[in-house]
């Protein structure tokens, strides 16, 4: 620590040149050099250490370490003293996280201040040396390897050689077999949604069948086929029932597939399969929250913005004599995002 | 559902359950009868009220005056609507109470969506305007006696996630819609405002009528919204409760940015 000195003014601005793969001529030796037996440049300004500043730095560093000690102790105390059951654990989180942060910060800051204030600020250049070993060492290594191969007797011991090759050759097989987990092929599961001809529309939460007129004008409801069970079997079934005002549906086909301004559309976005129902009842825009695909629900769910490539499939609905809405048939096309076998 | 409905007795006028349109219609017929009788006695010669039940005709008249001053320039002298504003006939008192009560109306400017702002009208004035608009045609009434405290918060949460969360965010923090429109945060919404918004469907919001989401279910949704509002954030700052987006922004900008700055400081010369 006594070598501490400022860099020479001439050296401050210029970056040291770095040479790779070539030995530099031996520089003037210094203490450091002889200690490390390395090529090192030093600017040899005389050390100037203000003893008071040195003392002050020492005091600063030890104060930071003391803070670290206190914060670590605070963590230990808080771990037992502050209950994690109070306030949803918020108090405990704050105490533990806060004390740990202070403790780590103080230790780290102490080390940095130590390095900045108390360590000598020598400017040193250390060239890289060649990565080659000496030819003699390379020869020795080669001989050792070949002698080892000889000793193993791979050439003579046929049974060992063959079983080893068998073992190594067989080893990749499990990896290949495991690729089967990429399957099985989905077959028809991507084409079937759970909607059948005659399936009543029921509410997703209450599971009650939906009657014509239950929905207000400008309303939207998430419906499922009656008797739906696990989400995985009916993952493609979620359907939006939307009720328009009179004359608001601008597509004749859309109106024909609905009942009295009620229309049903798949809730699964045709882009990436997100469930969508960000429906704006005045503009009749339906927005997908994932990638901002926007569908015009008054015009056959036409895509008016965003990455979706197809309109949302419409579910043809009818009303029975009791006033309940039901599906006239399954979806006429696969719902949700594109897939390989989709036609 | 007939005249035997207890709601239709005059004593129960103030207790009309929330927006049950069939009951309300029955109630209104009976009330109009009773109202005509009473008015005939008290104000013979004055025009009879086409009233929504809970308000008397002087309130409607004061509401009409306020309407003529503050609303009629866009919505028309009789609330029939104009080139820039929709008709208010049949929107109901609840719609007017919501729009004026949250400061969305009178409209600030013709931007994508009316922002909520401070309501310039007093509570009574707002009620009077709502009473007048409610008298223009049958529509949802202002909900009263919201006993949401005893509702099932878990079921309310399920309903909220199915019907509301797609726009208003799972914690009711709101979110963006198309072309500058947005679903507002629900953290400052009062139970009455939430209820009114559900039955009237202000602006882009769909209407959630009482046949679709029954009044007790609406109470449960309100209970859920009010409950999550008071939930503490165990992880510290909630960062708007909009999920991983704001958390990532803070982690990258503040966390990693701060680390880079500290690293640069450590690497700098003493």
Image: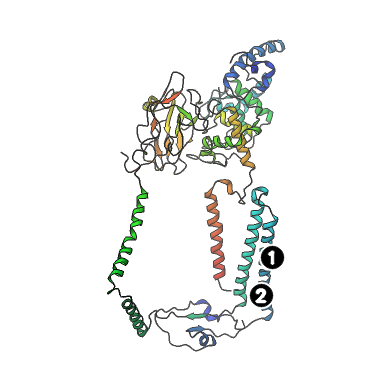
The answer to whether A92 is drawn above or below residue A13 in the figure is above
Vertical position of residue B137 compared to residue B222: above or below: above
Residue A72, percent from left and from top: 66, 64
Q: Where is residue B198 in the image (x, y as percent from the top left)?
A: 56, 31
Q: How far apart are marks 2 and 1 (CA)?
A: 20 Å
Q: Label 1: few (<14), some or many (≥20) within 10 Å?
A: some
Mark 2, secondary structure of its residue: helix
The correct choice, above or below, for A224 with respect to A78 in the image is above
Residue at left offset 32%, top offset 60%: A170
Q: Secondary structure under badge 1?
A: helix
Q: Quadrant of the C terminus of chain A?
A: top left
Q: Along the line of sight, which residue is nearer the eye, A183 or A294?
A: A183
How many C-alpha atoms fall within 10 Å of the one at disc 2: few (<14), some, or many (≥20)?
Answer: some
Residue B64 vs residue A340, the one in the foreground: A340
Of A319 and A196, the residue lying toward us:
A196
- Left or right: residue A105 versus residue A143 is right
Pointer 1: what residue?
A70
- Which percent across, then down, holds residue A200? 44, 26
Task: Kindly identify which residue carries mark 2.
Answer: A57
């Amino acid at each position: 620590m006594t070598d501490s000195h400022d860099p020479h003014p001439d050296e401050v601005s210029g970056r040291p040149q770095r040479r790779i793969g070539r030995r530099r001529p031996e520089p003037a030796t210094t203490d450091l050099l002889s200690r490390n037996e390395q090529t090192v440049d030093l600017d040899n300004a005389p050390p100037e250490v203000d003893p008071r500043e040195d003392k002050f730095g020492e005091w600063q560093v030890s104060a930071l370490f003391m803070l670290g000690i206190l914060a670590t102790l605070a963590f230990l105390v808080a771990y037992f003293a502050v209950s994690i059951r109070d306030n949803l654990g918020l108090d405990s989180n704050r105490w533990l996280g806060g004390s740990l942060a202070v403790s780590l910060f103080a230790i780290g800051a102490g080390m940095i201040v130590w390095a900045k204030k108390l360590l000598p600020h020598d400017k040193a250049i250390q060239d890289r040396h060649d990565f080659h070993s000496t030819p003699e060492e390379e020869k020795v290594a080669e001989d050792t390897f070949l002698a080892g191969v000889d000793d193993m007797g791979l050439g003579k011991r046929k049974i060992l050689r063959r079983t080893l090759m068998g073992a190594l050759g067989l080893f990749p097989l499990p990896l290949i077999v495991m690729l089967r987990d990429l399957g099985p092929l989905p077959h028809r599961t991507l084409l079937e949604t759970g909607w059948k001809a005659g399936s009543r529309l029921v509410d997703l939460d209450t599971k009650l069948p939906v009657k014509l007129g239950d929905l207000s004008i400008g309303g939207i409801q998430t419906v499922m086929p009656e008797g739906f069970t696990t989400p995985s079997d009916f993952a493609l079934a979620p359907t939006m029932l939307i009720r328009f005002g009179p004359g608001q549906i601008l597509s004749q086909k859309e109106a024909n597939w609905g009942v009295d301004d009620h229309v049903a559309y798949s809730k699964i976005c045709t882009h990436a399969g997100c469930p969508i129902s960000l429906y704006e009842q005045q503009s009749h825009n339906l927005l997908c929250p994932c990638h901002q695909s926007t569908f015009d629900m008054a015009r056959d769910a036409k895509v008016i913005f965003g990455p979706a490539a197809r309109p949302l499939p419409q579910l043809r609905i009818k009303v029975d004599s009791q006033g309940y809405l039901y599906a006239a048939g399954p979806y006429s096309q696969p719902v949700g995002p594109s897939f390989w076998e989709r036609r | 559902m007939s005249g035997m409905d207890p709601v239709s007795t005059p004593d129960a006028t103030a207790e009309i359950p929330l927006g049950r349109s069939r009951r309300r219609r029955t109630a209104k017929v009976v009330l109009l009868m009773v109202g005509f009788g009473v008015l005939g006695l008290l104000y013979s010669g004055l025009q009879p009220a086409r009233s929504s039940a809970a308000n008397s005709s002087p309130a409607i008249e004061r509401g009409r005056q306020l309407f003529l001053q503050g609303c009629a320039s866009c919505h028309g002298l009789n609330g029939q609507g104009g080139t820039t504003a929709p008709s208010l006939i049949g929107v109901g008192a609840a719609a007017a109470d919501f729009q004026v009560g949250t400061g969305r109306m009178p409209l600030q400017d013709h931007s994508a969506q009316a922002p909520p702002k401070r309501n310039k009208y007093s509570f009574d004035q707002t009620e009077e305007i709502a009473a007048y608009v409610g008298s223009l045609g049958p529509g949802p009434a202002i909900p009263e006696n919201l006993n949401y405290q005893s509702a099932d918060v878990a079921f309310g949460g399920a309903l909220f996630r199915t019907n509301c969360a797609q726009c208003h965010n799972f914690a009711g923090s709101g979110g963006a819609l198309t072309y500058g429109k947005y679903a507002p945060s629900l953290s400052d919404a009062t139970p009455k405002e939430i209820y009114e918004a559900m039955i009237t469907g202000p602006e882009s919001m769909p209407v959630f009528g009482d046949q679709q989401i029954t009044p007790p279910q609406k109470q449960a949704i309100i209970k859920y919204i009010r409950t999550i509002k008071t939930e503490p954030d165990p992880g510290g700052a909630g960062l708007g409760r909009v999920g991983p987006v704001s958390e990532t922004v803070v982690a990258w900008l503040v966390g990693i940015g701060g680390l880079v700055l500290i690293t640069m400081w450590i690497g700098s010369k003493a």
